[in-house]
Amino acid sequence: MSLDVVTLRADGLTSRWVPSVGMVGVSLFHQGRELLGQRRGLNAYAEQGSTFGIPLLHPFANRLGGFTYAQQGIAVTLDASSPYVRTEEHGLPIHGLLAAEPGWVVREAGATTLSADFAFEDAGLLKLFPFRHRVSLDIVQEPDRVTVSTTVTPTGDRPVPIAFGFHPYLTIPGVARDKLVLRTPAMTRLGLDAQGLPDGRREPHDGRDEPLGESTYDDHFTDLGDAPSFTLAGGGREIVMHFVEGFTHLQLLAPPRSPVIAIEPMTAAIDALRTGEGLRSVTEPFRATFAIEVQPSA
């Protein structure tokens, strides 16, 4: 495995990224403490697509409800035996097609900036998502935050469906799970069935600002409001996830007995390639940006 780790550093905040393993973010280090959930680590991500850190989920986030979908009159069948396809506990495709892909080309790497491109043109990939495009990641490190911008630029003659997202795993070391404070805005919760797929239900979620306690989440939200932010706080530190532009949906994951919480920005609903829920198709470059801010607790 290549170890082309790019380190970005500004004062007390450091992030690390590995272009040759899917441009995954492997570390967010603040004043001597690691704030990204490491789970099974880089080797498992490279070999099996087992997510950790900050992985990109492209061209679809979360899961699909089956191995077929149709867009723009084109019927697509995903091959479960393809090395690009990962499946989850129900046997459904999950987390896109680019997990740990080595084809990223670094365009710029400086002390506080990293830019890289992936040309989505491989014949095997185009059988699974037949929309030629380029994915660009531009990362900027500041003393109190890291900002990640993703741009999808069509390079073929078809509009490109936009359904990507990220799966950041966040943690505050030394703080018990039940003491972690979770803050969210008011949103709309989208009901999920037993397979984790939207079932058409919608209900208001009033937001929260309290310790997790025994609460668990594996929930899907939309109607996030203008410039939404989501906070995990404890131990004198706050991690704030800002959805800056382009992201319309959120998957919030807080499993039982785990101190690692995932606040996942998404550009469309779960299963959007099949249902069309929240899906946009673009002929011009499309950009979505999130930022992770680290600051002292109020």
Image (tube, helix red, strand yellow):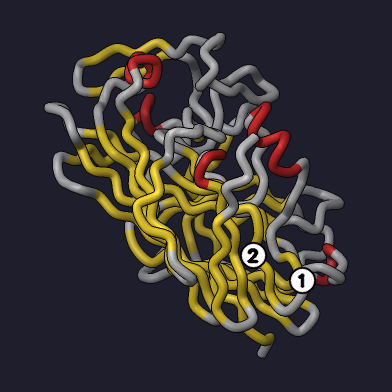
Query: Left of 217 or right of it: where is 281?
Result: left
Question: Which secondary structure, mark 1?
Answer: strand
The residue depicted at 73 percent of the width and 72 percent of the height is 181
The residue depicted at 14 percent of the width and 40 percent of the height is 283
Query: Left of 44 or right of it: where is 259?
Result: right
Query: Residue beneath label 2, please?
Result: 28
Residue 143, position as x, y percentages in the image: 54, 81
Which numbered circle lies on residue 33? 1
Query: Left of 226 or right of it: where is 8?
Result: right
Image quadrant occupied by the N terminus: top right
Quarter of the rendering containing residue 231: bottom right
Q: Nearer the viewer, residue 70 or 119?
A: 119
Q: Residue furthest bottom?
A: 298
For label 2, the crowd category at 10 Å Cα-Cα, with few meaning under 14, some 14 to 19 and many 20 or more, is many
Quarter of the rendering containing residue 59: top left
Residues at circles 1 and 2 in contact by the CB criterion of under 8 Å? no
For label 1, the crowd category at 10 Å Cα-Cα, with few meaning under 14, some 14 to 19 and many 20 or more, is some
Image quadrant occupied by the C terminus: bottom right
The residue depicted at 26 percent of the width and 34 percent of the height is 133
Q: CA distance from mark 1 to mark 2?
A: 8 Å
The residue depicted at 58 percent of the width and 20 percent of the height is 92
Q: Nearer the viewer, residue 188 or 240?
A: 240
* Depicted 253 relative to depicted 108: above or below: above
Query: Left of 16 or right of it: where is 19?
Result: left
The answer, for residue 73, to whether it is visible in the render is yes
